Image: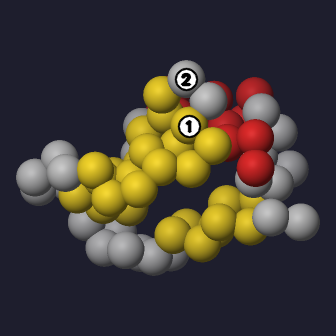
Amino acid sequence: MTTLFIDRRNSELSFDSDTLIFSEKETGAKIASVPIKLLERICIHGSIYLSASLLGKLGDLGFGY
């Protein structure tokens, strides 16, 4: 099982195509990206910004069950 742990403060999580993108909230600078097909679980801890549409997309893909 592949689990992604996210604990970096003041970062933003977004989705483009089939990739999760992590960026700095203040500057918008890209930190990293991960293909969603490699993941089975995502654990978020701390001050991470994400949209309701991203949560919906993750739910559609089977995350959170």
The residue indicated by pointer 1 is: 19
Does the residue at mark 1 contact the one at mark 2 (Cβ under 8 Å)?
yes
- Please state which of residues 17 and 44 is positioned toward the viewer in this rendering: 17
The correct choice, above or below, for 16 with respect to 23 in the image is: above
Q: Residue furthest top?
A: 17
Which mark is on residue 17?
2
Q: Position of residue 63 (x, y in %)?
A: 77, 46
Q: Is residue 63 left or right of residue 6?
A: right
Whether residue 64 is visible: no
Q: Residue at x 62, y 30 (%)?
A: 18
SS for callout 2: loop
- Please state which of residues 44 and 31 is positioned toward the viewer in this rendering: 31
Q: Position of residue 65 (x, y in %)?
A: 86, 50
Q: Position of residue 46 (x, y in %)?
A: 41, 75
Q: Is residue 1 left or right of residue 24?
A: right
The correct choice, above or below, for 59 with respect to 13 in the image is: above
Q: Is residue 28 left or right of residue 21?
A: left
Q: Residue at x 25, y 66 (%)?
A: 10
Mark 1 surroundings: few (<14), some (14-19) or many (≥20) residues within 10 A: some
Q: CA distance from mark 1 to mark 2?
A: 6 Å
SS for callout 1: strand
Q: Amino acid at mark 2?
A: Ser
Q: Residue at x 52, y 43 (%)?
A: 20
Q: Residue at x 67, y 42 (%)?
A: 36
Q: How is the image coloured?
A: secondary structure
Whether residue 47 is visible: yes
Q: Amino acid at mark 1?
A: Thr
Count of labels shown?
Answer: 2
